[in-house]
Each structure stands twice: as structure tokens, then as C-alpha cells.
Image (cartoon, grey):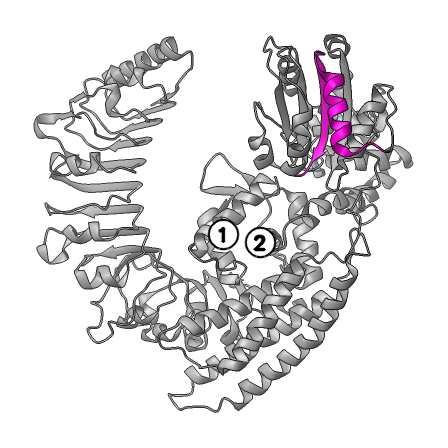
């Protein structure tokens, strides 16, 4: 289903991009486009409610495959004709072939639409249960070993037995199989808990739930039978009266939606007697919306904890046989820290012959889940319940190497280039993609790292992505030792990460969307020999060596749908001059030359072409921010440039870029510069003789500035004194190599929101202002290569801050 949806969205994006292009490479017949668009939109809506399988299947659904094939055929017809048109030396070509190909696609979609409508007509009659829904709402989990969660257990016990009198909601959040239910169950059975609460009950919610049945289950645990004729609200009122005045504990296990909570919340009275409700869920967003909640997050087990849990699962309290210890450690490590997978594999080992040869076979097969798919089915259930628009984005996570930190901006660019992100009026594709990622993180299917810029996916979930993607023909991932002779046919490939291992010849480069390559010189020559074929590319990341071209290929303007252009030109350490055709690429969203590029002036005869989609641009040398340039890039959000002090570069016009949020500016000499009020992040690097006072008055009053870095430069008489009303929203402040700074004076009101202070290379600083200790939001101070006085004052700030607010500052110094 993910591939079918993704291909439909991609085809729709191609049609829309052609429609809005000022000079489209092909012109489609209006009535035919309207018909095709109508069919695509219907099928997208149909897929949003289509659920063909009750559980995990190794085969793709035939109807989904037909939808994907039809959408792909439409893409192929359009892009093939565009390639022929753009590479035909300017000669006009007949549109008959394209028209006939699209007519064939529309006819196929008509048949699919008829079948889809028949299925929709049966939806009201047939009721498909979600996976694993056979478990009764009244069932309470069997006793399981608690390993690696002793601290969480103590925290949960403390929350349940605290002196807080108001009704407290305690969410336990974690991915499927991480031990949420086991933790709740273990504490639920504690004698101390049983004695503290007047009444306790356990209710399992699951994806599909019946509120009346949940209430009935709770009453049965109170040994109270309920009349079958009572409605949901009548049972709820009866429950409210029964709980009123009693100190109660309710465990609501496996909650999947806030709707379930909204429908029961009013029937749990708060009589200020210390009652508690524990909610286990996979959804972080759901947990954050619960009132009066105090969340606990489940972590994956480390190697030692995995080994302990596996040992208990297989042998109980008995010792592990020495002859099986080595292979047992391998098996425990292979379970990737997920308690559920350890318990599943441990159960198989417990029932098998306790012989090394048998367990070696288990290690080779069971951990791949080929013999027992139980763990995969649990993970699959998390995938299956995803909204359709998130499924292709989630499956795409499998293309990244195992255990790799994934750079979020690059991931978002890939999603957009693949055509996974459906346009929404009033939002950029980047904003929509960020919402997709936030949703996946909230569902614990993607893991956020300690940095806001990176994410990860657990190995078991990555395995699920690879299986589903291969089943749906979404992508193919070759292992490092796969030779070209065993690869699948690549004539249909649309994306390629190329690392010299495969030849380019099997590819149909005319339809390639994504190309990421880091080839040697001979390989780059091969690439540029195929350069003109890449006219349908959407994402290009290449290693450019100026020896292979006098300048960057001038035919870049033909790449009508190119969104991201990343040029790695570190190898030549030289600024590249971009061709003038770059101003004709109205679909471009991101341009990055790692060492630098020099932009030509915009053409004077093309006022109708505006790069409205351009979001980021860098690294530009001698950036001319003229009125003409500003009009060409009105929606840019990220900009990196360096400039000398020549007035021709018009940096006073920067404030006209009213959407600019992130600016890296390298200034050589003194120049007039104005900043837009939209800035959130600013990195200023100047020569040593540049005086910061000439610019900081403008910076300090920026209303949305969160992150500021000052590098080099100087302060008049070695002193910086901030004033009232400055830096009111600043959270992160970094000073680097400001070597003449000796005296720094602030008041706490000047940086009221500051969270992190990083100082590097302030050799002459006499003291970090002690007023920083009175800023309640301050969490981190890093002092590197600074004076001893700076380190001493940082320690004092940390001590005083703890005295003021009872919280330690993360203090690091070298």
C-alpha cells in the first residue's frame, strides 16, 4: 500500500509541477490531465481507508500492485517524453505517443476505480479486525521478568505512592515490545500498591475498543456484574459513583488514540485523595496531551541486561550451561535490546534441545524471524496502523545503513525528492515533511537522538522496512558484497546511491530522480558523460572536480524538476562559478556547494521567472544582495555567504528577505548590513579588526533570535556591555576567538531565556558575569581555551544557580 500511495502522490506532484512551471518542457492536454488527476485523487482517497489484510502477509495485495503500476506508467510516460523533448536538439516532437500512453493509463485506472468502488460498497458489511485484537480486554498479562527497568520501577512506585492528592495520570511510553506492560504489571502486583489503594483495576484498550466493554471489564474486577441493557454513558456514571471517595488505581494498557481517553476521562472522579491512572502507549504525542501527566519513557536493554533477561527466560533461576554460554551471548546481543524479541527467542530456546548445534541453527534462523514471525508481527502491527501518508516515509528509513545516525534535513530532502510528500495549501513541502517525521517519532517508530538534527531507527524496525519495501517493490538495497551480476534489473531504477561499486551503464539515467555519488576521477568522468540524461533528476549530490569540466555544466538549466543540488568540491578547494541557467530552475529548493560557488547576476530579460521554492542557498562567495536578487529568492529560509566590504554587494537589502530564518555570514572588512526580523539563527564571523558594537545593537533586538554565534571580531576597549531589551528570546549563545574581550557586563534581564552558553578562545576574559547564575533557564556552560578566571567564575555561577533554583548546570571546561 505504501508503494501505491507514494507513486500516486509522485505522479500528482509531476503534473502539478508542470502546471505551475513558467516554461514547462511539455504541455499536457487539459481535459486528459483533468481526467487523470481525478482518477489519482480518487485512488488516494480510497487507499486512505483500504485495509486488505488482517495480519502480516509476505505477498503484496494485487489491487495495490495494480494501482502502483498504473501510477508508475503515468510517471514513466510523462518523464520519458520530457527527456526526449529536452534532448532532441530543440526540435519539436509529436505528443501523440504521450497522449496515447496516458489514455491507456486512464483506462486502466477506470477499471481499478470500479473495483475500488465495489470494495467501498462492502465496507459497511464487512468488519475487519486489527492484528492481535483477539486478546480480551479483561485479560491481564502473565508474569514476565523485569530486567533493566529497576530505576523505572522505583520511579513508578514513587509516583503512585507520593503525597500528591490530585488525580495523577502516569503515561508509560515506548515502542512496541519495550516492556511497558511488563513494568505496569510488575508494579500493579506489588503488595505495597495493593495495600495503598482501596480498589485496583486493569483494562486493555488496544486499537479498536468498545468503551462499554471496558467499563464492564473494570466492574467485573470489582466483582460487580452489570446489566447488559445499560448504555455506555450509564455504565460510566455508575463507575463514577463507585469510584467516588475511594482511592483507586486504574491501569489503561495499550492505548492508541486520545479519543479513547476523551471518552472515559469524565468518569474518573478526582476527590483529592491520591488516586492514580497509569496509561501505557506507544505514542509520545498522546502521552503529552494527557492532563496532569508525568511521563515515564522505556529504554531498550543494553547487552548485559539483554543477557540477563534471556537467561531468566530460558533457564529461570537455574544457571546457564557453560557449553551454551558463548552462543547464548550472541543470541542475546542479536535481539537488539528489545525485551519482546528476547522473550520470543528465549521461549523458542527453552522448548528446543539444549545442544550447541541446535542453538547455532537458532542463531542463524530464529533471529532473522524466518521460523517464528511473532516479534515481526508485533512490529508489523505498529506499521500497519500508520496513516497511509506515513507508510512510504517510514519504509524509506530502511535505505540507511544499520545503526546510522540519520541527518534530518537530508532525510526530508530525500522524502520530497521521492515524491512521498503530498502538497498542502499554505505549507511548504519541508514543513509537511517535518510534521511527518514528528509523527513517526511520536509513535516511537523513529528515534530522536540527543541532537535535534539527527534521528535513528532501531534495527528490528529497519528489518521490517526492508521486508515491506521489497514486498511492495518500493526500493532495493544491495549489500556491500553484492556484485553487478546478481543485482535486479536497474533499468527501472529511480534512485541510486553510488559508491563506485556498480557501473552506470545498466541504469536508465533519463528517469533517475536521486543520484548520490562519491566516485573517483574516472567515475566522475563517466558521470559527466551521462550528465545531459539527468534532466528528470530531483536530487543530485555529486563530487565535482574542476578538471573534468572548465566550469559547472551549463546544461543544468534543463533539469526542470531539480529540487536539491549538493556539490562536494573540497577536492579542488576552489570556488565554482555557477552557470547563468541556475536562475531558470524554478523548481530548485536547496543549493549547497560545500567549498563555495559564485552566483552570476540574474538575467534582465526573465522577470517572470522567480525561484519561489528556494529554501536554502550556500555557500555563496561575494553575495550580491541587490533588489533584483531579493525579488528572485523571496522565500529563502537558510543562507550562507561571505562578502568583502564593497558597497556593490548591497547587504543593507538583507532585511528584505522576510522569510529568512538561518544566516551564516562571513564578513571581510566593515560593511553596512541589515537583518530581517524573521531570523532565528545567526552565525557571524568577521575579521579581527571588525568591531562588534557596530552590529550587535541590530542583532540584540531581533524578536525571534534563538541561536547566536560570534566568531573573531573585536570589542571597543575590550568591553561588552549589554543593555535592557536585548536578546530577549536568545537560548544559545556562543563566543569564539573574541580574543580582546576582557570585561563583560550583563544583567539577568538581558538574557531571560538563555539555556546554553559556550565560550571558546576568550583568553583575556577576566570573568563570566555572575548575573548568569540568576537566569532560571540556564542549563549548560561550556568553557574551552579560556582564561583561568573564566573557569573559576563558571564554577561559581554553577554553584549559585543551584542555590537559587535547586538545579545543577551542566558545566564543562578544558
Q: Is residue 726 above or below residue 595?
A: above
2 or 1: tag closer to the N-terminus: 2
SS for tag 1?
Answer: helix
The verdict on residue 277 being magenta is no
Determine which quarter of the picture holds residue 613. bottom left
| Closer-to-camera residue (300/472) | 472
The verdict on residue 255 being magenta is yes
Q: Is residue 497 above or below residue 66?
A: above
Q: Residues within 10 Å of mark 2 (few under 14, many from 20)?
A: many
In which quadrant of the rendered image does the C terminus lie? Answer: top left
The residues bearing labels 2 and 1 have C-alpha atoms spaced at a distance of: 9 Å
What numbered label is drawn on residue 185? none
In which quadrant of the rendered image does the N terminus lie? Answer: bottom right
* Tag 2–tag 1 contact (CB < 8 Å): yes
**Mark 2, mark 1: which one is toward the viewer?**
1
Image label count: 2
Determine which quarter of the picture holds residue 589. bottom left
Residue 283 seen anywhere in this rendered image of the structure: yes
Q: Is residue 1 left or right of residue 781?
A: right
> Where residue 261 sits: x, y (%)?
66, 32
> Where residue 170 sits: x, y (%)?
63, 23
> Where residue 806 sits: x, y (%)?
42, 11
What numbered label is drawn on residue 433? 1
| Closer-to-camera residue (6/428) | 428
Q: Residue at x 77, y 24 (%)?
A: 202
Q: Residue at x 26, y 37 (%)?
A: 703
What numbered label is drawn on residue 393? 2
> Where residue 232 sits: x, y (%)?
76, 33
The magenta-colored residue range is 229-257
| Closer-to-camera residue (655/603) | 655
Amino acid at each position: 500500500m505504501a508503494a501505491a500511495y507514494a507513486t500516486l502522490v509522485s505522479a500528482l506532484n509531476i503534473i502539478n509541477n508542470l502546471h505551475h512551471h513558467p516554461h514547462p518542457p511539455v504541455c499536457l492536454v487539459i481535459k486528459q490531465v483533468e481526467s487523470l488527476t481525478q482518477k489519482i485523487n480518487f485512488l488516494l482517497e480510497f487507499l486512505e481507508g483500504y485495509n486488505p489484510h488482517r495480519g502480516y502477509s509476505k505477498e503484496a495485495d494485487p489491487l495495490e500492485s495494480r494501482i502502483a503500476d498504473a501510477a508508475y506508467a503515468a510517471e514513466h510516460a510523462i518523464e520519458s517524453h520530457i527527456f526526449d523533448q529536452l534532448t532532441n536538439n530543440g526540435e519539436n516532437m509529436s505528443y501523440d505517443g504521450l497522449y496515447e500512453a496516458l489514455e491507456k493509463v486512464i483506462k486502466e485506472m477506470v477499471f481499478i476505480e470500479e473495483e475500488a468502488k465495489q470494495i467501498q460498497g462492502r465496507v459497511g458489511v464487512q468488519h475487519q479486525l486489527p492484528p492481535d485484537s483477539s486478546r480480551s480486554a479483561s485479560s491481564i498479562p502473565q508474569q514476565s521478568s523485569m530486567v533493566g527497568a529497576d530505576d523505572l520501577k522505583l520511579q513508578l512506585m514513587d509516583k503512585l505512592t507520593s503525597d500528591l492528592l490530585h488525580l495523577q495520570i502516569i503515561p508509560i511510553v515506548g515502542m512496541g515490545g519495550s516492556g511497558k506492560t511488563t513494568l505496569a504489571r510488575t508494579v500493579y502486583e506489588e503488595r505495597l500498591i495493593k495495600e495503598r489503594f482501596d480498589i485496583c483495576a486493569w483494562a486493555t484498550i488496544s486499537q479498536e475498543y468498545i468503551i462499554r466493554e471496558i467499563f464492564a471489564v473494570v466492574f467485573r474486577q470489582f466483582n460487580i456484574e452489570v446489566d447488559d441493557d445499560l448504555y455506555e454513558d450509564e455504565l460510566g456514571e455508575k463507575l463514577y459513583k463507585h469510584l467516588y471517595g475511594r482511592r483507586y488505581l486504574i491501569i489503561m494498557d495499550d492505548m492508541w488514540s486520545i479519543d479513547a481517553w476523551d471518552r472515559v476521562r469524565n468518569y474518573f472522579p478526582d476527590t483529592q485523595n491520591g488516586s492514580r491512572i497509569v496509561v501505557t502507549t506507544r505514542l509520545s504525542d498522546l502521552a503529552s496531551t494527557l492532563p496532569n501527566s508525568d511521563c515515564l519513557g522505556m529504554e531498550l536493554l543494553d547487552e548485559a541486561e539483554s543477557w540477563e533477561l534471556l537467561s531468566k527466560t530460558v533457564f529461570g533461576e537455574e544457571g546457564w550451561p557453560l557449553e551454551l554460554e558463548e552462543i547464548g551471548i550472541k543470541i542475546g546481543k542479536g535481539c537488539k535490546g528489545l525485551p519482546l524479541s528476547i522473550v520470543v527467542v528465549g521461549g523458542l530456546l527453552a522448548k528446543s534441545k539444549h545442544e550447541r548445534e541446535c542453538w547455532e541453527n537458532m542463531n542463524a534462523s530464529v533471529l532473522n524471524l524466518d521460523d517464528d514471525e511473532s516479534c515481526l508481527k508485533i512490529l508489523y502491527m505498529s506499521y500497519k496502523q500508520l496513516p497511509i501518508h506515513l507508510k512510504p516515509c517510514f519504509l524509506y528509513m530502511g535505505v540507511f545503513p544499520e545503526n546510522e545516525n540519520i541527518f534530518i534535513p537530508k532525510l526530508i530532502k530525500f522524502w520530497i525528492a521521492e515524491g512521498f510528500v503530498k502538497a498542502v495549501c499554505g505549507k511548504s513541502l519541508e514543513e509537511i515533511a517535518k510534521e511527518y517525521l514528528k509523527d513517526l517519532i511520536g509513535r516511537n517508530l523513529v528515534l530522536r537522538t540527543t541532537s535535534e538534527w539527527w534521528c535513528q531507527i532501531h534495527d528490528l524496525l529497519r528489518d521490517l522496512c526492508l521486508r515491506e519495501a521489497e514486498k511492495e517493490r518500493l526500493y532495493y538495497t544491495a549489500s556491500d558484497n553484492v556484485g553487478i551480476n546478481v543485482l535486479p534489473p536497474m533499468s527501472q531504477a529511480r534512485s541510486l546511491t553510488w559508491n563506485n561499486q556498480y557501473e552506470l551503464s545498466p541504469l536508465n539515467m533519463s528517469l533517475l530522480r536521486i543520484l548520490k555519488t562519491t566516485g573517483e576521477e574516472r567515475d566522475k568522468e563517466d558521470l559527466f558523460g551521462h550528465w545531459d540524461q539527468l534532466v528528470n533528476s530531483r536530487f543530485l549530490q555529486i563530487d565535482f572536480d574542476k578538471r573534468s569540466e572548465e566550469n559547472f555544466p551549463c546544461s543544468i538549466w534543463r533539469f526542470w524538476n531539480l529540487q536539491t543540488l549538493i556539490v562536494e568540491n573540497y577536492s579542488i578547494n576552489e570556488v565554482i562559478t555557477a552557470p547563468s541557467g541556475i536562475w531558470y530552475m524554478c523548481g530548485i529548493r536547496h543549493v549547497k556547494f560545500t567549498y563555495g560557488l559564485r552566483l552570476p547576476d540574474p538575467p534582465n530579460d526573465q522577470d517572470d521567472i522567480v525561484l519561489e521554492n528556494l529554501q536554502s542557498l550556500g555557500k555563496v562567495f561575494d553575495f550580491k544582495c541587490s533588489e533584483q536578487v531579493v525579488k528572485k529568492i523571496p522565500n529563502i529560509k537558510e543562507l550562507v555567504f561571505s562578502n568583502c566590504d564593497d558597497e556593490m554587494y548591497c547587504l543593507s537589502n538583507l532585511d528584505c528577505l522576510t522569510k529568512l530564518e538561518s544566516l551564516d555570514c562571513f564578513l571581510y572588512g566593515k560593511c553596512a548590513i541589515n537583518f530581517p526580523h524573521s531570523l532565528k539563527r545567526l552565525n557571524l564571523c568577521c575579521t579581527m579588526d571588525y568591531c562588534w558594537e557596530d552590529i550587535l545593537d541590530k542583532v540584540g533586538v531581533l524578536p525571534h533570535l534563538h541561536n547566536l554565534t560570534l566568531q573573531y571580531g573585536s570589542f571597543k576597549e575590550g568591553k561588552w556591555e549589554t543593555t535592557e531589551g536585548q536578546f530577549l528570546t536568545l537560548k544559545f549563545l556562543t563566543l569564539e576567538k573574541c580574543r580582546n574581550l576582557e570585561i563583560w557586563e550583563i544583567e539577568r534581564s538581558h538574557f531571560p531565556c538563555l539555556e546554553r552558553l559556550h565560550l571558546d578562545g576568550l583568553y583575556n576574559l577576566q570573568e563570566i558575569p555572575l548575573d548568569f547564575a540568576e537566569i532560571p533557564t540556564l542549563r549548560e556552560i561550556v568553557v574551552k581555551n579560556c582564561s583561568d578566571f573564566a573557569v573559576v567564575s563558571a564554577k561559581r555561577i554553577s554553584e549559585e544557580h543551584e542555590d537559587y533554583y535547586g538545579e545543577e548546570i551542566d558545566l564543562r571546561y578544558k
